[in-house]
Amino acid sequence: VGVGGGGGGGGAIWGSKMQEQVRMLMAQSIGVFQPSKSARTQLNAILEKRRRSTPDAPVIAFADERTSKRFGRYFVGFPTLICTRMSSEDGKMVVLEGNPVDRHIILVDDIIISGHTSLRCGELLRNSGAKTVSLFVTHGNFQNDSWKKFSNGPFDRVWLTDSCPQMAEALNRHGPPFEVMSMAPIAAGVIDEECFRFLSDPTAQANTRAPLTASRL
């Protein structure tokens, strides 16, 4: 999350004091043992205000309405865009909602296998006048070397996690446009939180067979 003071004329609003407040709230909201829900609420409100006050804020795009309904709630305050197929026969993509012209677009999805839909969306957004088009996907489960199609594809950057380790290693070696992010900090935070909950819960301690529920992974 960017917390600098530049961009969109927001320097006066997002000065050093606000940056320090945001960093403090971020630390509290992802606390190792007891994450603060009130800190997360305050942080979301501040970041939403900044997004709305920054004309050049990125547009979050989704490949279809189903994906938008699943993940749209995680991007409060961001302008959004939805693509869709005209028909299942020709696979032609159109922009159903939103305007990509002169905007920085980040296409969001949970998993890539063939990459066909993501590439079609990226090409559509690029040809529709977007300044930049990037892709974030949680699981890069590319099959049959389909990742190679992204090397000279429509995306300026392709962000993904290392949830598929062998593929992540190969993409790290390849380099741009791929950028691999580690899931270890997220996993460690969840595990620490669950351990703390277990140790502070007499009922859980009494039943040693009760599994730790790292459901947020």
Image: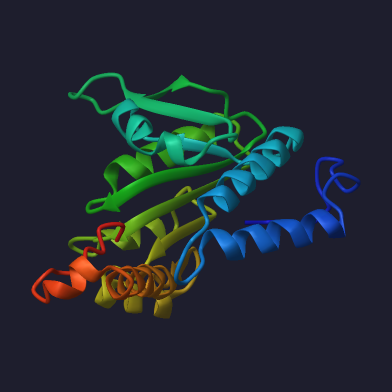
Q: Is 156 located above or below residue 48 in the figure?
A: below
In this image, 19 relative to 213: left or right?
Answer: right
Quadrant where the C terminus is found in the figure: bottom left
Q: Answer left or right for 48 relative to 216.
A: right
Q: Position of residue 209 (x, y in %)?
A: 8, 73
x%, y% of residue 63?
Answer: 36, 34
- Location of residue 114 with respect to 205 vertically, above or below: above
Residue at x-position 14% and y-position 69% = 211
Frontmost residue, 81 versus 53: 53
Query: In percent of the image, x 75 and y 38: which residue is there?
Result: 54
The number of callouts visible is 0
Is the image coloured rainbow, by chain, by secondary structure, or in one colour? rainbow
| Residue 13, position as x, y percentages in the image | 86, 44
81 or 36: nearer the viewer: 36
Side of 103 where 14 appears, left or right: right
Q: Is residue 83 above or below residue 204?
A: above
Horizontal side of 157 relative to 62 (left or right) equals right
Q: Is residue 188 visible?
A: yes
Q: Quadrant of residue 189?
A: bottom left
Q: Position of residue 108 (x, y in %)?
A: 42, 44
Query: Which image quadrant for residue 144?
Result: bottom left
> As drawn, which residue projects farthest toward the left?
209
Q: Residue at x 88, y 48 (%)?
A: 11
